[in-house]
Image (cartoon, grey):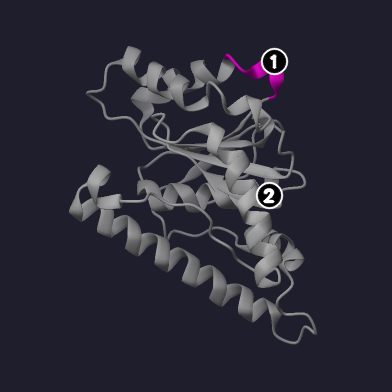
Amino acid sequence: MHSDLAVIIPTYFGRDTPPELRRRLMRDAVCDLGLFVAPSNWVVVLDGAPWARGDVLSVLDEVRNSGKPVVVDVETNIGKGGAVVAGIRAALEEVSGCAALAVMDCDGDHSAHDLTHLVELLAQVRAYTGRPLVEVVGRRIDRHGCLGFIRAELEGVTSRVTFASLRFALAREAQGSSHPHQSDRLIPALRARARSAGPRRDLGGSVRRTGSRGRLPRLYS
């Protein structure tokens, strides 16, 4: 069990997706996840699809005995990139002891059984590189084959912009430090930034979050 790992699950199902299929796909996504990460370390982002909310929550209720996931409820669809950002912020604020983040799709496209291998690889990369502030481990071998050209290119651009922004923000945080490259500064720095971000509109829509600590203040308004 990886107690220091938070798993972010951006979730969206189209209005025309049958409820039975929504529940089956969501169940496929999380059925084995509890073997590796406790449900209290899951951050499920409901990305502006109120018609699917009940289906998603019904699947999460099935694992409630093992812990209650953090749920980020986005009223207006902000897209996968925005949902991932909202999930990262919630994970840094709400998952105790979080030292690593993983993102998994809501339709079973990613296997929870890969998490252990990725965590081990992350440890090797940190040891080899001297523990840099941000590491990205794991990706699709061929984005275009499974996503199509346009979506694959958009996902690649989104990933590059997201992590370039993280590196820039953390570089500014590290200015004046005698140890600017220690990875043990990563999570505290990101968590401090998440808590001090305050209301903003850059992702569009508003977010309310419920989880193990009950109703929390809005992230965006």
* Depth order, front residue of 208/31: 31
Comparing labels 2 and 1, the label whose residue is closer to the camera:
1
The residue indicated by pointer 1 is 65
Residue 90 in view = no
Residue 93, disc: 2
Residue positioned most to the right: 178
Q: Which residue type does callout 1 highlight? A: Asn
x and y percentages locating residue 161 in the rendered image: 41, 68
* Residue 145 lies in the magenta stretch: no
**Left or right position of 16 against 56:** left
Q: Is residue 215 visible?
A: yes
On whether residue 63 falls in the magenta region, the answer is yes
Sooner in the amino-acid sequence: mark 2 or mark 1: 1
The residue lying at 68 percent from left, 49 percent from top is 93
Q: Which residues are magenta?
A: 62-67
Crowd around label 1: few <14 · some 14–19 · many ≥20 (10 Å)? few
State the SS at label 1: helix
Compared to residue 20, the image places residue 52 above or below, namely below
Answer few, some or many: residues within 10 Å of disc 2's Cα (few below 14, many 20 plus, some between 14 and 19).
some
Q: For the point 38% across and 37% down, which residue is it?
A: 48
